[in-house]
Image: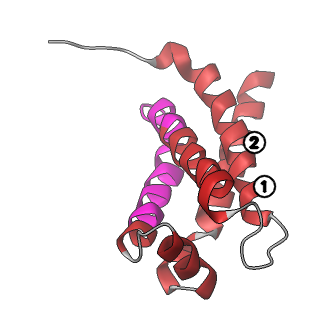
Amino acid sequence: MKTSYINLILKIVVAVILLQTLLFKFSGSDESVYIFTKLGAEPYGRIGSGIIELIISILLFVNKTKLYAAIMAFGTMLVAAISHLTILGIEVMNDGGTLFMLSLIVLFCSSILVFQYKNDFKLKLI
């Protein structure tokens, strides 16, 4: 019972962080455009990642897809964290490292969710 509350809190944290960035990505804020221009993925990477993050935020709360959403969140934030460490830098446009820290928080929370939901994986070949 206690684990289900923790998982719910983790899912809410992941979803809130992912959803709050959508306004910036979809509105074409200067910071988002800068990031994806530097990555060589503007505008398709910005819009595409926003759509993926929206899908993840919804699928986290659907029982049959929560494991896959957690895996997608982990993968997406792993790419974001690596991009910060290799191309963007930890601090982007004087944000004090906020975006990097948010990616690490989502990475951490989603890794716990993947571990918690790993037994939900069912491989059906036929």
Q: Residue drawn 71% across and 62% down?
A: 89
Q: Is residue 28 left or right of residue 98?
A: left
The quadrant in which the C terminus is found is top left
* Quadrant in the rendering for residue 125: top left
Residue identified by numbered label 1: 101
Viewer-proximal residue among 97 and 12: 97
Mark 2 or 1: the one toward you: 1
Of residue 45 and residue 55, the one placed in the foreground of this image is 45
Q: Which residues are magenta?
A: 48-71
Magenta-highlighted stretch: main secondary structure?
helix
User: Tag 2: residue type?
Assistant: Ile
Q: Residue 88, labelled with which disc?
A: none
Q: Is residue 125 above or below residue 84?
A: above
Can residue 89 be seen from the camera position used here? Answer: yes
Residue 87, compared with residue 126, is above or below; it is below
Local crowd at mark 2 within 10 Å, few (<14), some, or many (≥20)? few
Name the amino acid type tagged 1: Met
Give yes or no for residue 61 being in the magenta stretch: yes
Residue at 72% across, 72% down: 92
For disc 2, the marked residue is 9
Q: Residue furthest right?
A: 96
Magenta-span inclusion, residue 124: no
Choose top left, top right, bottom left or bottom right for residue 51: bottom left
